[in-house]
Image (cartoon, rainbow, N blue to C red):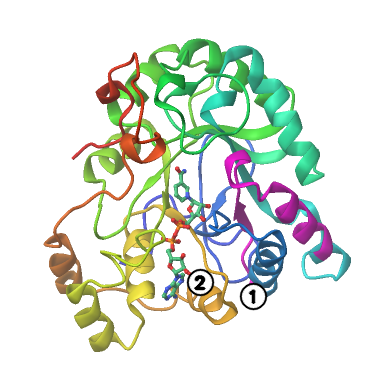
């Protein structure tokens, strides 16, 4: 399964990383990108990791207003240009996201401008609605106070997202953590359809329904938490099935997970602060999984790591039904 649907080669920009078409405008999305959500967040560590990623060949960096990593990303890209690691900022595909407290029609443009100011860039390649919910406007809060969560004004917010693209502040616009129901609502009102849906996806949460739906509607899927996300308990890195395939193939468990995602036709954003791992995570393009490997992976028990409960404070009461805001879908 060497060439997943939608793959368009490297476009001459990333010598080692293939790209996927996504949406009408802008450049294709590199199949492997670098994630910058890190807790505890240490700006210098993230800046060094982004620079290391660009050095070994990554050409997509994923950030968000919530991660507080936009400044570090911008500085690392500028440093990479100064050092000749990349020819120009245009060579790097930069994604950022608008948090729930910014997801209000009148706050979208100020929010992308604030992100661009931190990134020290004229535009981002992709701007995403981070979560299908809004929160009381104000500071970037995580977790969100239960009483502050509210339904998203999808139509008003998407009009403003479209304006970001028309003004050239974002080359593409998209969403994150959207279920097929939410995507249907969006497609019904969008003049510019979302180019991308970024969702948790890995062998332990395979997102078959989303993948099928998005393929049908021409929305590209990017996997986040492709290695199961942070924390000691990790259903991907500790999977016995993946361990067995890893031993047989002579690849790491992480590489098996990432290769599996690529073979589903999705791109991914993967995070590590360790140089060897950063390099290892992009070495997935000169080998492939067998049908038998796929069959074994399809049997892995499914478990989603992040649900709406994880973005809300444990105490307090909300006035909205959490089922409305949740991201679980089998
Ligand atoms: N849209 C959303 O709502 C959303 C949600 C979650 C994440 N994201 C994005 O997706 C990115 C990646 O997801 P993630 O940060 O949750 O975690 P992840 O990429 O699934 O990685 C999980 C952990 O695995 C470790 N790791 C990395 N490479 C490894 C390797 N080769 N072998 C063993 N361990 C390895 C990393 O720790 P070390 O640093 O110690 O190597 C990392 O903390 C984020 O940084 C963010 O940009 C988006």
Along the viewing direction, whichever of 8 and 186 lies nearer the viewer: 186
In the figure, 62 relative to 144: above or below?
below
Q: Is mark 2 on a helix, strand or loop?
A: loop
Give the crowd class for mark 1: few <14, some 14-19, many >=20 residues within 10 Å: some
Residue range of the region highlighted in magenta in the rendering: 57-79
Would you say the residues marked 2 and 1 are in contact, meaning their CB atoms lie under 8 Å apart? Answer: yes
Name which of mark 2 and mark 1 comes first in the sequence: 1
* Image x and y of residue 206, in percent: 25, 52
* Image x and y of residue 160, in percent: 62, 17
**Which corner quadrant holds the N terminus?**
bottom left
* Image x and y of residue 264, in percent: 31, 55
- For ligand 1, tell me if the residue under mark 1 lies within 8 Å: no
Q: Name the residue under label 1.
A: 56
Give me the disc on residue 282.
2
State left or right for residue 106 relative to residue 182: right
* Image x and y of residue 297, in percent: 18, 65
Q: In which quarter of the image is residue 230?
A: bottom left
């Amino acid at each position: 399964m060497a060439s997943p649907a939608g793959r368009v080669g490297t476009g001459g920009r990333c010598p080692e990383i293939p790209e996927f078409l996504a949406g009408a405008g802008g450049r294709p999305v590199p199949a492997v990108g670098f994630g910058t959500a890190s807790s505890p967040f240490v700006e210098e560590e993230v800046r060094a990791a982004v620079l290391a990623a660009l050095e070994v060949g990554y050409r997509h960096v994923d950030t968000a207003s919530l991660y507080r990593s936009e400044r570090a990303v911008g500085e690392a890209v500028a440093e990479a240009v100064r050092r000749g690691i990349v020819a120009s900022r245009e060579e790097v595909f930069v994604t950022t996201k608008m948090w729930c407290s910014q997801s209000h029609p009148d706050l979208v443009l100020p929010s992308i401008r604030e992100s661009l100011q931190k990134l020290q860039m004229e535009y981002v390649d992709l701007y995403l609605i981070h979560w299908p919910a809004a929160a009381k406007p104000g500071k970037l809060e995580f977790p969100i106070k239960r009483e502050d969560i509210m339904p998203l004004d999808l139509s008003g917010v998407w009009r403003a997202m479209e304006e970001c693209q028309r003004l050239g502040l974002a080359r593409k616009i998209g969403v994150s953590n959207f279920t097929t129901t939410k995507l249907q609502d969006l497609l019904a009102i969008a003049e510019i359809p979302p180019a991308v849906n970024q969702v948790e996806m890995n062998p332990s949460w395979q997102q078959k329904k989303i993948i099928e739906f998005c393929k049908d509607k021409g929305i590209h899927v990017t996997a986040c938490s492709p290695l199961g996300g942070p924390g000691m308990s990790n259903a991907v890195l500790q999977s016995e099935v993946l361990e067995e395939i890893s031993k047989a193939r002579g690849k790491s468990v992480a590489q098996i997970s990432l290769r599996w995602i690529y073979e589903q036709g999705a791109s991914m954003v993967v995070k590590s602060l360790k140089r060897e791992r950063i390099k290892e995570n992009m070495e997935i393009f000169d080998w492939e999984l067998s049908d038998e490997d796929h069959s074994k992976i399809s049997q892995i028990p499914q478990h989603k790591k992040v649900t709406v409960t994880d973005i809300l404070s444990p105490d307090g009461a909300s006035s909205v039904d959490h089922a409305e805001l949740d991201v679980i879908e089998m």
